[in-house]
Image (tube, rainbow, N blue to C red):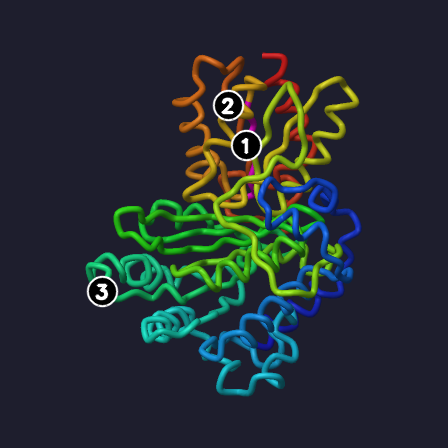
Amino acid sequence: MAKSVKELGKQWMISSFSKRGFSTACSTLKSSSSSSSTMEKQSGKSVNLFTAVNQALYIALETDPNAYLFGEDVSFGGVFRCSTGLADQFGSKRVFNTPLCEQGIVGFGIGLAAMGNRAIAEVQFADYIFPAFDQIVNEAAKFRYRSGNQFNCGGLTIRTPYGAVGHGGHYHSQSPESFFCQVPGLKVTFHSASIGALHVEVFILYLQSPAQAKVKVVIPRSPKQEKGLLLASIRDPNPVIFFEPKWLYRLAVEEVPEDDYMFPLSEAEVIRHGSDITLVGWGSQLAVMEQACVDAEKEGISCELIDLKTLIPWDKETVEASVRKTGRLLVSHEAPVTGGFGAEISASIMERCFSRLEAPVARTCGLDTPFPLVFEPFFMPTKNKILDAIKATVNY
């Protein structure tokens, strides 16, 4: 089993992803935050997404002697090579392999974090996070609350690659972020890439105040975002699940500062300004949405594109301000449409902006089927599907 998974990972690493588009907005538009502005002034070197992950993990381990990295095949670099060289640098007591047991990986991480350490756990594929569901939902998310804030496992970060990859089939392509978005006590952060958009990472974090406990989904848009958001998640005083877009591990390339830096969690970013319709997405889907925005512009439709980055608590104010301006909203994600986080966004905006909407909120998402293999192109919310939804919404 382990060997077959490794071989599959190797095949993915050498596959050509030239047909997958990407967003470069992150390198041309400054964030409203001072930290992002500072990043614009720093020089770096062009690296891909998995290298940005490696840099962030190296910095986390180097700057905190109580940080530990563990998971299946982690010590030799992992299926996607994100931890390459770290065991040599920091030793087998701080970077080490675990058995093939996701429940055990997360349970061990909870205990390690509860003792005051930084536990960076890797679940090899997000599709296999479900055996750890009980540990995440009933233990990590409630640890602080049930003890009256006397104890916590806030040092826990769970990294896991998610989303479509072109040939992953049922068990290596899923986007399970919405399962965790109803769990008080968790933050879910998604990462997308400078290729733009594979946002693809989800963090589940526990908020400091039990009364404010929420699930956060944060999605970086690029290698630069990946590094800054991952470091912020590792150092956040709450448990985090960080979903990384595996499609972008080698496809996404941009200039990333070599220094230690962090980006704030829970802040959405307008990466394309427009006036006719607002589009909201996260992770890898942003790249597809940006392509649709470009084609829509050729037909006279001005689209505003927002990278949500964090799902819970998500940045309602930024989305609301945009929808009040455009009067229309389209949400897109890879996960199946029913019960996806797009439904929560749709309901919230209907409540907040009902009198300003010129059309029903549209959702272009994955189908309500198991993730297919040869029929993946039919399952995915493609550029043409999004473009059709843009036209239908604008012409409603």
**What percent of the width, then of the height, locates residue 139?**
29, 63
Cα gap from disc 1 to disc 2, whole angstroms? 8 Å
Is residue 213 magenta-colored? no
Chain-order first, disc 2 or disc 3: 3
Chain-order first, disc 3 or disc 1: 3
Is residue 331 magenta-colored? yes
Q: Quadrant of the C terminus?
A: top right
Q: Which residue is mark 2?
A: 361
Q: Is residue 354 above or below residue 239?
A: above
Q: Which residue is mark 3?
A: 150
Q: Is residue 213 left or right of residue 178?
A: left
Q: Amino acid at mark 3?
A: Gln
Q: Is residue 124 left or right of residue 353?
A: right
Magenta highlight: main SS: strand
Front: mark 3 or 1: 3
Q: Which residues are magenta?
A: 329-334
Q: Residue at x 75, y 30 (%)?
A: 294
Q: Amino acid at mark 1?
A: Val
Identify the element where label 2 is drawn.
Answer: loop
Towards the viewer: 251 or 335: 251
Front: mark 2 or 3: 3
Q: Residue at x 54, y 54 (%)?
A: 201
Q: Which residue is mark 1?
A: 331
Q: Amino acid at mark 2?
A: Val
